[in-house]
Image (cartoon, rainbow, N blue to C red):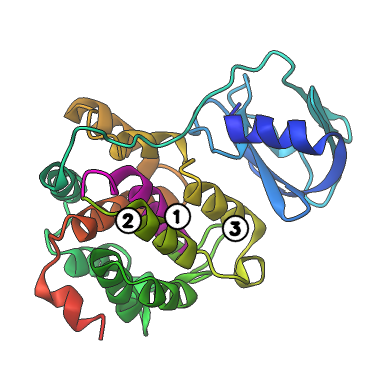
């Protein structure tokens, strides 16, 4: 079980919610404006979730069903999950003490190379996520990266308004990119010399005030947790500069299998934000930030 979920359970106590949707390997449960994610062993642990012992079978939860949750587990109809002896997992990103901007830039370039994408951030995202950059999407990405590089919260907020909720699915590509961005800022603000005040302002700017109205509950939950430095399990290795290449490459492969594009967008976001914060963006980004 992820520590943020345990903390939420301790704060909130017993309650009732609704099954948002389920598959064989994952189920999402809504409680107010928050979401709990239960996943099978093959699916990476989410910061708002718990992993079950079984390898599948979570499609036994019926969408729309009432679910009751308590400190020791939850029940929806005939389906019951207990976690009174659950192992707690800290999904906080590394602060990367002892590293510098060159190390951050190197990780960004290495990630793009491992994903077989172009070294230019704008070309990379255009090739990898054409739906995200369609219309004014490419301008939004350019504004985002330039705002992070230049530490401009107002421009970051503008990009967030353009990207939040952009794309189909439970976690649209725009949200996944923003979640990666806020988590990467937590991991790389120290090595790149960004002041804590600037980093805090930028992270806040990337969470729009009307987040719950612009996107779905699951996406909003993951964005809020990312802003606290809590991420989907494999993302930690991508953002950990102490992780050796075989380790983060395994994490990358696992991350890329999440959803129809969620994991890949997270990985791409980590790479692009690393380059932005390290000051390694090319002039093409400036053209799309105007």
Say what secondary structure mark 2 lies in. helix
Magenta-drawn stretch contains 29: no
Q: Are marks 3 and 1 in contact (CB under 8 Å)?
A: no
- Magenta-tinted stretch: 175-192
- Horizontal side of 82 relative to 47 (left or right) equals right
Q: Callout 1 environment at 10 Å: few (<14), some (14 to 19), or many (20+)? A: many
Q: Measure the alpha-carbon separation of dots 2 and 1.
A: 8 Å
Q: Main secondary structure of the magenta part?
A: helix
| 190 sits left or right of 66 in the view | left
Q: Position of residue 108 (x, y in %)?
A: 19, 49
Q: Is residue 241 above or below residue 264?
A: above
Q: Is residue 39 visible?
A: no
Q: Position of residue 97 (x, y in %)?
A: 26, 33
- Label 3 sits on a secondary structure element that is helix
Instruction: Name which of mark 2 and mark 1 comes first in the sequence.
Output: 1
Residue that carries the numbered disc 3 in the rendered image: 220
Check contact, mark 2 vs mark 3: CB within 8 A: no
Kindly identify which numbered label has been placed on residue 269.
Answer: 2
Secondary structure at numbered mark 1: helix
Q: Which residue is mark 1?
A: 179
The percent position of residue 270, horizontal first and vertical second, equals 30, 51
The answer to which image quadrant residue 246 occupies is top left
Ranked by sequence position, the earlier of labels 2 and 3 is: 3
Q: Is residue 121 visible?
A: yes
Q: Residue at x 43, y 56 (%)?
A: 200
Q: Who is closer to the viewer here, 171 or 130?
A: 171
Separation of marks 3 and 1 at Cα, in angstroms: 9 Å
Write the residue at 50% across / 33% down. Answer: 43
Q: Residues within 10 Å of mark 3 (few under 14, many from 20)?
A: many
Which of disc 1 and disc 3 is earlier in sequence?
1
Work out whether 24 lies above or below 122: above
Q: Decide: marks 2, 1 in contact (CB < 8 A)? A: yes
């Amino acid at each position: 079980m992820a520590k943020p979920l345990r903390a939420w359970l301790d704060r909130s106590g017993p309650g009732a919610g609704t099954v948002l949707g389920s598959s064989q390997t994952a189920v999402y449960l809504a409680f107010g404006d928050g979401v709990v994610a239960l996943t099978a062993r093959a699916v990476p642990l989410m910061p708002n979730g718990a992993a079950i012992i079984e390898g599948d079978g979570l499609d036994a939860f019926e969408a729309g069903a009432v679910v009751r949750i308590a400190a020791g587990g939850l029940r929806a109809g005939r389906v019951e999950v207990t976690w009174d002896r659950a192992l707690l997992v800290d999904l906080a990103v590394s602060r990367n003490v002892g590293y510098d901007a060159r190390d951050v830039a190197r990780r960004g370039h290495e990630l793009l190379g491992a994903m077989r994408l172009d070294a230019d951030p704008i070309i990379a995202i255009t090739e990898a996520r054409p739906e995200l950059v369609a219309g004014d999407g490419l301008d939004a990405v350019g504004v985002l990266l330039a705002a992070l590089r230049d530490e401009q919260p107002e421009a970051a907020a503008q990009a967030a308004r353009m990207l939040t909720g952009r794309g189909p699915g439970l976690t649209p590509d725009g949200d996944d990119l923003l979640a990666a961005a806020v988590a990467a800022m937590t991991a790389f603000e120290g090595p790149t010399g960004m002041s804590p005040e600037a980093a805090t302002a930028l992270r806040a700017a990337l969470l729009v005030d009307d987040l719950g109205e612009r996107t779905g509950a699951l996406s909003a939950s993951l964005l809020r947790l990312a802003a606290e430095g809590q991420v989907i399990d494999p993302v930690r290795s991508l953002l950990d500069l102490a992780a050796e290449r075989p380790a983060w490459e395994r994490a990358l492969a696992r991350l890329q299998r999440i959803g129809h594009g969620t994991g890949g967008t997270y990985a791409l976001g980590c790479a692009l934000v690393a380059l932005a914060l390290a000051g390694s963006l090319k002039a093409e980004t400036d053209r799309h930030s105007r």
